[in-house]
Image (cartoon, coloured by chain):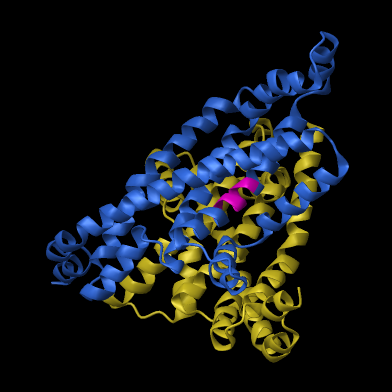
Amino acid sequence: MEIHRLLFSFFNADVASRYWPDIVRGFWVTTGLGAAVIASGLAVGLALALLRALRFRPASFLIVVYADTFRALPPLVVIIVLFFAFPYIGLSMSAFAATWLALSAVLGAFAEEIFWAGILAVPKGQTEAARSTGLSPLQTLIHVVLPQAVRLTIPPLTNRMIAVTKGTALGSVVAVHEIIYYASSGASEAGNPTPLTLGALAYLVLFLPVVVGSRWIETRFRWRR
Amino acid sequence: MDQIIQLFLNPAVVARFWPFLLHGLGTTLALSLVVVPAGLAGGLVVALLYNAHRRPLSWLVTAYVDFFRAFPPLVLLLFLYGGLPFLGVDLPLFGTVALAFLLNTSSYYGEIFRAGIESIPRGQTEAARSTGLSAWQTLCWVILPQAVRNVLPDLIGNTVEVIKLTTLASVVGFTELLNNARNAQALTYNATPVVVAALLYLALLWPLVRLLSRLEHKSIAVR
């Protein structure tokens, strides 16, 4: 009897078939948002780390302030400030844009720190050798230091990318139409938590392969250190 | 400029809602003080179970860890919040929130402890056991102190993540800092409470983030 009630509540076929298309729609929004955040976040992080490698004091200082701020602020607070506070000064944006911008800023901050740590970890002799063969500082950075640095950064970067991409669920708070938005509005509409089960399954389908893959990446790149 | 201050850092609004925001900050800290130690303890248990090297057990632990790492914490929270009543479990809101965060964070702490324990050479255990220490004593007095030191930056980093995680509780109406700030904003039609909340989070977490950067750069320099 108990198991029957459990199935009725969490795995209700009737409710599931009604809300399934919504969850699929949300799935694609989550995937698109996640991909956009990864692309722009990594680009920002890499650009800032390279800028910092030029060791121009004022620029480095500003980069550290940016990285510290967005590593310390909870992402949900950033989203809410962008979405609810900026319209007061006439800067309103869509929920999707606010979430994308906020999560990109957060991933950018973490990625900058990780890339920078990777650049620092490449021995100084590499730079000296490259420079003495006649490469310019920029060529040295791009052709010698960066390829080695990126290899070191792959495991921590993968973990951070997963963590920030999972943050796309926060978009539901400002009504981005992603998985959670459809799942929780479906659950309250149907008076049954089955849409939440579907949403949870959708996240597992999306992220479980990535998490298992990150384990493989970690062992694959560990020995090269 | 004046208008921006009126909207984003209005002194009158700050004065009116300061106690309300501080109360929210207190709740945030209380939640963190429950979830962080419980998560550390849970993570340690996860790592020790993994380290017992009993096949089905370590598979189960890996499945547990991967499951909760793949699950966004907000999804977990909403699932417990919306689902537990249907199971006939009636937890107070604090309990639901703490349980969701605990499940999420113990798997992260578990991974960190596991990496720390694996970083200690086997010879350490063998040497300690051969001097007559019991397996338990070896773990407590020889392995863990070194393991924790090796992964200290990661432990601090995850603790920062846990404190940031508590903001999610605002989604289910738990009256922590962000929740109170959003309520105050709705009352005043003014962005000040949310901006002040952001500044409070910065004040709370910035020192930890700074410390973290130092530790990370130090460990790279040593390498």
Name the residue at 28% across, 78% down.
B88
Name the residue at 42% across, 40% down.
A210
Tell me where the magenta segment starts and ends, as one range. A103-108
The quadrant in which residue A49 appears is: top right
Q: Is residue A192 above or below residue A183?
A: below
Place of residue A99 in the rendered image (x, y in percent of width and height, measured from the top left): 50, 58
Name the residue at 58% across, 40% down.
A42
Direction top: furthest residue:
A133
- Whether residue B209 is visible, yes or no, is yes
Q: Nearer the viewer, residue A208 or B91?
A: A208
- Chain painted in blue in the figure: A
Name the residue at 79% across, 50% down.
A62
Quadrant the N terminus of chain B occupies: bottom right
Q: Nearer the viewer, residue A124 or B128?
A: A124
Place of residue B204 in the rendered image (x, y in percent of width and height, measured from the top left): 73, 68
Tell whether position A104 is magenta.
Answer: yes
Q: Is residue B161 above or below residue A56?
A: below
Please indicate whether residue B19 sits to the left or right of residue B102 in the image: right
Tell whether position B210 is magenta.
Answer: no
Place of residue B161 in the rendered image (x, y in percent of width and height, measured from the top left): 61, 58
